[in-house]
Amino acid sequence: MSRSAPARSAPTASARRNAAPPSATHAEKIRDHLAREIASGHLVPGERLDENEIATRFAVSRTPVREAFRLLAANEMVELRGRMGATVRKMSAQTVIEMFEVMAEMEGLCARLASRRVTPQLRARVEEIHARLVAASGGQDVDGFYDINQEFHEAIYEAAGNLYLAEQTRRLRNRTAAYRRRVTFQPNRFANTLTEHEQVMAAIFAHDEEKAHATMRDHVNLLSDDMRDFIASFQ
Amino acid sequence: MSRSAPARSAPTASARRNAAPPSATHAEKIRDHLAREIASGHLVPGERLDENEIATRFAVSRTPVREAFRLLAANEMVELRGRMGATVRKMSAQTVIEMFEVMAEMEGLCARLASRRVTPQLRARVEEIHARLVAASGGQDVDGFYDINQEFHEAIYEAAGNLYLAEQTRRLRNRTAAYRRRVTFQPNRFANTLTEHEQVMAAIFAHDEEKAHATMRDHVNLLSDDMRDFIASFQ
DNA sequence: ATGATGGAAAATGTATGCAATATCGGTATC
DNA sequence: GATACCGATATTGCATACATTTTCCATCAT
């Protein structure tokens, strides 16, 4: 990443005109990496992000690191205070609970809109993902289960047919990922998750919007109850 | 803002310990200034923000300008695309409709939670605001009506007892303010607004969460229907 | 006339060094 | 012991220069 780095073959102008995505900037890569560390809990809430340490770690100057911090602020994952650096956003137990409450409603709303707007293609997609989730629940691959679970939710967001809602739901989900991840790794969550997903699916495919909303909200709220206990013990 | 600028008296360490805010960075000032230009319509959606032009305008280097752009991304006021600069965020008619849909639900959720959590003090507050709104509806002061109307909504947000939800609802409301304001200035909106607020209040005070949610959602959705027509005519 | 190519200019990304501010630890005072 | 002050150090903000990528325009081929 230094100036003496070997020259790369630049994409041709014609490749650019075919709307090929530009190569990611260092700032973007650092942001993505730090976001993952925050979501995974490796970087903990309240922790200071040291420009110099991160610059050294990624073998870049401070400039893209500072830009990465500001990009992370755009995702509300870090807090910036003028002249006082960046810290991983710390949320009080109360705020986490509130965010969960909102998230349950937003996911419920996604399910509600999906029950009105789901297409045959998306229905097939949801069912296919669920089948994969059932298959994954028999294994020991927790991360794999978690990833497919997220695919399931993403498909519901898409079926809702409201991009803005999907975006905001994702955003909130990312912000709470570290907290939520600790709960979904409970022993009997897999079976419960499958049952609850099935209830949500049944309501959506029956075009029952109240039930779709309620079953999805309850599915996410179950998480919230667990989180309440977890957070209480954590404080 | 150049290095040869006259030296300023730095705040003393004791002033600092009394939690005096640090002086605003150039990046923060530029962000605030551009945010105002965007809100006022001086910078129009889709417009490119030229680093060099802005740097020249503010007599600073490009560095704080770039940082300001990334800070603006945090407010979703500009869009950043790697290696392709910043543009004022452009909202399609579809996005506006989607945002309204989400807003109706979020305000509905505020009302729902308020129906469970309203205190006698907040009840009195809502009633007092409504009385002022009734008084204002007889006059010609549209702005005054609008301000009190906003107070009414703010009181519901507060009664919901979820700060995060209040914050996000406000945020969305602010983002759509310019579009919404064009509709609320219709001739018979005042009387309808009062009637609808009364329905919301009745449901909240009766602790009927479904009805509170539905009446508030419908109140805001009425706006959405009007907006749909308005936007269709606008395109 | 249209599309492809190449080079120059413009714009964006980054590194480096200096300026400005915050933090920390030691010392003095009450 | 608590508070204030001061100087040294560390951290953050910013300017400048260079590197990289994108855009624009002229030219050529079909």
Image (cartoon, coloured by chain):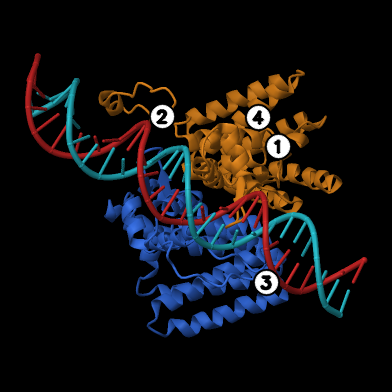
Chain colours: A blue, B orange, C red, D cyan
Which badge, 2 or 4, is on the more N-terminal residue?
2
Which badge, 1 or 2, is on the more N-terminal residue?
2
Chain letter for mark 1, please: B
Query: Is disc 2 in the same subunit as disc 4?
Result: yes
Badge 3: few (under 14), some or many (20 or more) residues near its Cα, within 10 Å? few
Q: Amino acid at mark 1?
A: Ala
Which residue: 56% across, 47% down?
A: B73
Q: Position of residue A186 (x, y in %)?
A: 35, 71
Which badge, 4 or 1, is on the more N-terminal residue?
4
State which mark lies toward you, 4 or 1.
Answer: 1
Chain letter for mark 3, please: A
Relative height, residue A75 to residue B35 (above, below): below
**Residue identified by numbered label 2:** B23
Q: Amino acid at mark 2?
A: Ser
Query: Is disc 3 in the same subunit as disc 2?
Result: no
Asked whether A135 or B204 is in front, the reply is A135
Badge 1: few (under 14), some or many (20 or more) residues near its Cα, within 10 Å? few
Q: Is residue A90 visible?
A: no
Chain letter for mark 2, please: B
Which residue: 33% across, 24% down?
A: B10
Q: Is residue B210 visible?
A: yes
**Residue identified by numbered label 1:** B178
Q: Amino acid at mark 4?
A: Asn
**Residue identified by numbered label 4:** B149
Q: CA distance from mark 2 to mark 4?
A: 36 Å
Q: Position of residue A123 (x, y in %)?
A: 66, 75
Q: CA distance from mark 1 to mark 2?
A: 31 Å
Helix, strand or loop status at disc 4: helix
Q: CA distance from mark 3 to mark 1?
A: 40 Å
Q: CA distance from mark 3 to mark 2?
A: 46 Å
Q: Amino acid at mark 3?
A: Ala
